[in-house]
Amino acid sequence: MKIIKKYWPILLIFILILIPFIPVLNSSFFLSDDGEWMVIRLSAFHEALRTGQFPVRFLWRLNYGYGYPVTNFLYPLPFYIGELFHLMGLSFSSSIKWVFILSSFLGSLGMYFFSQKKWGTMIAFLVAIFYAYFPYRLFDVYVRGSLGEIVALAVAPWVFISIDQFFTEPKIKKFAISSLLIAGLIVSHNTLAFMFLPVVFGYVLFVYKNPKFNLFRISLIFLLSLIISCFFWLPALHDLQYVIASRVDISSYSQYFLTPQVFQYTLGLPFIVLCFLGLRNLNLLKSKIIVFWVTVLIIGLFFSSSLSQFIWERLPLTKAVQFPWRFMSLVMFAATVLLGNFLGFLKKSIFTLALLILFISPIFLVSINTVFRPNGYYETNDATTTVKDEYSNIWLKEKLKNRPDKKFEFISGDVLQKDSNIFVVRKVSLMQANVMYFPGIKVYVDGQEQVIEYESSGLVRFFLLPGQHIVQVRFEGSKLHMKSNLVSLFGIIFLLAILFPYRRIGHIYAAKR
């Protein structure tokens, strides 16, 4: 009973988080734009991980069996979390559902702790529920199925908690935790990290005193977070030169501004009430924190609406953000924080309970379409899982559309295939492995690395000399991949040294003896 009394908000938050997922707490899955693609990607991720590939960059099964480097470019953290659920015995579809559930819970829990010291338990609880049931988040889950965004929105509150703790009481361990959480945001979703990090910098400079010194400290935090996450962001930026992503228009941003219908799904009644609260309490604008979050909210709304189209036309936002309504993530976060401030000012329990009912209500407006598919559907699907196959390499003459009949083909020469990867070559022959080339792909003949020719076809080609040979095609990563991995490893070791200093470990060891 004492535990329930002490932790009732956390338990109740978890129960309320589960309500939207009740229709799919079985073997079915909800239909959305990207949700099922995430299941397919996780199954391919698992296969690549089992081959010893770490970090996972190249998914062999996708792109019709030619391979696809999607996790080299897009948010890997959700799939490592999904892999943990799968290793616990869950199917791939259930694993993805539980990533959504866990992320929703951790995000709301983070918002609860972010609010608790400021406004007390009851208001913090309401703020957490508002964050969970904000219409845009429900839209993100059930309409878009955006796994990476939901994970990033789970990390974001914890980033601000750690920032508050460090800049209130600067300590080296708090510095390390802040860096780790920002690194987590970066590997959760590229675009949301791009949008939230300026807000983090602005929060530190605007809210806390001594901005010049704080700029130095937040820059150090950011630097360590970049070191920790270097394995992901550096190859993602560098390797864009090898794929067609920058050459294709993945989406027309002008079609994704807020419309009345999208407004209903992403903002709705809670936001209107929030604005009403703000108008009734204009004196709150004397607070620097309120001014900051109102500014973030306005910026988010501006870039989500067609009012900002002239900026989208002149700045490279199209490639980086793709969908204007992604700025609703900032609106959602700012609106939730402002709600806590307004309720903290009002301190009317009856009114806050009414708000609880009000902000839970959007869930009943959500129409969840479910579908049952056997596990084999996800485990054998070999599409690219991206909109326009934008991570295909630049040397392919045309898009790959069908799974190849053979793993190896012979372009010229005289070759007898004895086994899946054993060949008898009678004269110098040009062989093609039906694998899309990407830096890090390597071919070994009798254990010796071979030169790959890829520019003529975009596929992996190499020569075989006369004789019997064993051929292996592996993904081992490029030199840049290896260097970025080492930088991240150094950052993680440095982080662990801060969190678990040698002296402390020595004391623990001595105590055991």
Image (cartoon, rainbow, N blue to C red):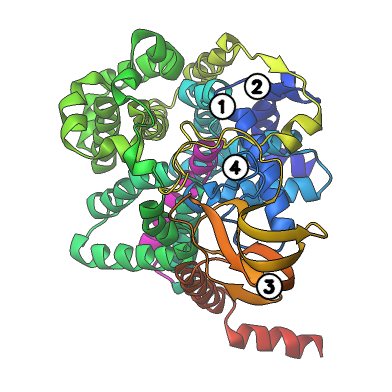
Q: Nearer the viewer, mark 4 or mark 3?
A: 3
Q: Which residue is painted at 43% across and 43% down in the image?
A: 118
Q: Position of residue 460 (x, y in %)?
A: 56, 56
- Specify few, some or many for label 2: CA neighbours under 10 Å numbering under 14, 14-19, or 20 or more: some
Q: Reading the chain from its start, which is encountered first: label 4 or label 3?
A: 4
Q: Amino acid at mark 2?
A: Pro
What stretch of residues is rendered in magenta?
A: 147-171
Asked if one can make out residue 74 in the rendered structure from this viewpoint, the answer is yes
Give the CA separation, mark 3 to mark 2: 63 Å
Q: Which residue is mark 4?
A: 106
Asked if residue 508 is positioned above or below residue 335 in the image, the reply reads below
**Label ID, residue 141:** 1
Q: Which residue is mark 2?
A: 20
At numbered mark 3, what does the secondary structure look like: helix, strand or loop?
A: loop
Asked if residue 96 is positioned above or below residue 208 in the image, the reply reads above
175 or 232, nearer to the observer: 232
Give the CA separation, mark 1 to mark 3: 56 Å
Locate the C terminus and report the quarter of the image it occupies: bottom right
